[in-house]
Image: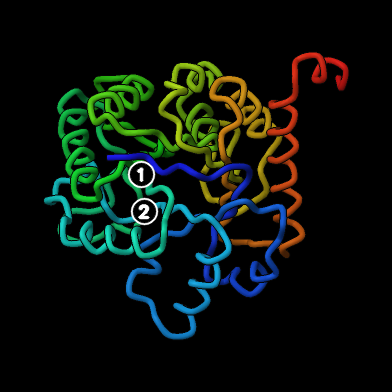
Amino acid sequence: MTARYTVSGAGLGLRRSMMASCMKTPPEVDFMEVAPENWIGVGGPLGRKFRWFTERYPLVCHGLSLSLGGPAPLDEHFLHRLKSFLESNDIRCYTEHLSYCGDDGHLYDLMPIPFTGDAVTYTAARIRRTQEILERRIAVENVSYYAAPGKELDEIDFVRAVVEEADCDLLLDVNNIYVNSINHGYDAKTFLEALPPERVAYLHVAGHYVEAEDLRVDTHGSDVCDPVWTLLETAYEHCGVVPTLLERDFNIPPLEGLMGEIGQIRNLQAAAAAPEGARSAGG
């Protein structure tokens, strides 16, 4: 299996509702991310529009339905269809959530896998089987969660153990670390710096909803807040200047607003890549 992480810079999650505005080909966007479940088997006008993007941008895929930690058998039929889709569209990287989303049917939400040793073994085996079928490495995303039933391990130890035993990579979601740090009372910077930088494929950054002083809800429906931008700087210090994708699922502003946040990503990447002397001179 070979990794194909040939993306760089700043990326944007492509939603169908954004197609018309994004077809202006904004030069600030280096790559795009799509959910394959939304595009497998799509033809007609939408299929032609999708091909317009695949011909102009490096694309990565972020899955929604594989349920890597779920009790139902791994959906190998879907994985074979996914493999054809990834290959026919020259998808550079495939990622999924380190979660489960159903049993005999979908819950339409991302549920936390119990942080236990048995769950590490079970989930890692399903990731390895996924990589065998797809014939490529995948990356799994650290997810936001609001309860931890049956917890035996800390979240950081669970994530590290899964990616090590599965021998897969990590899609590091900076916003999810921040959200979880507020909701579960740990230090976000310490958590991030405990992750293996050599396994990080790319980063996600997004906004969230402030429900209460001690409760954040991962919505992807607002602008990225200052503490998350600061944590993104920490991620570049820890992992290097890794490709970074801006997620926005609703309350989508005009394209110019999205490009402002893409510009912030690019500015932080440029600052992190600058020689130490240049960073010091620039303040």
- Which residue does the image show at 21% across and 33% down from the upper left? 124
Cβ atoms under marks 1 and 2 closer than 8 Å: yes
**SS type, badge 2:** loop
Q: Residues within 10 Å of mark 1 (few under 14, many from 20)?
A: many
45 to the left or right of 226: left
Give amino acid for label 1. Answer: His
| Up/down of 186 relative to 178, above or below | above
Q: At 52% across and 76% down in the image, what residue appears?
A: 49
Quadrant of the drawing holding the C terminus: top right
Q: Is residue 211 visible?
A: no
Q: Give residue 278's mark.
A: none
Q: Position of residue 248 (x, y in %)?
A: 58, 55
At horizontal 22% and vertical 56% (from top left) the residue drawn is: 79
Name the outermost residue toward the bottom: 44
From the viewer's side, name the closer residue of 88 and 10: 88
State the image coordinates of residue 170 (x, y, percent, origin top left): 40, 34
User: Which residue is identified by label 1?
Assistant: 97
Left or right of 234, for residue 196: left
Q: Is residue 228 above or below residue 68?
A: above
Q: Which residue is at 39% across, 69% downward?
A: 39
Q: Residue at the left extreme?
A: 73
Mark 2 is surrounded, within 10 Å at the Cα level, by few (under 14), some (14 to 19) or many (20 or more) other residues, namely some
Task: For marks 1 and 2, give the CA distance.
Answer: 7 Å
Which residue is denoted by mark 2 in the rendering? Answer: 63
Tag 1's secondary structure? strand
Three-letter amino acid code at the position of disc 2: Gly
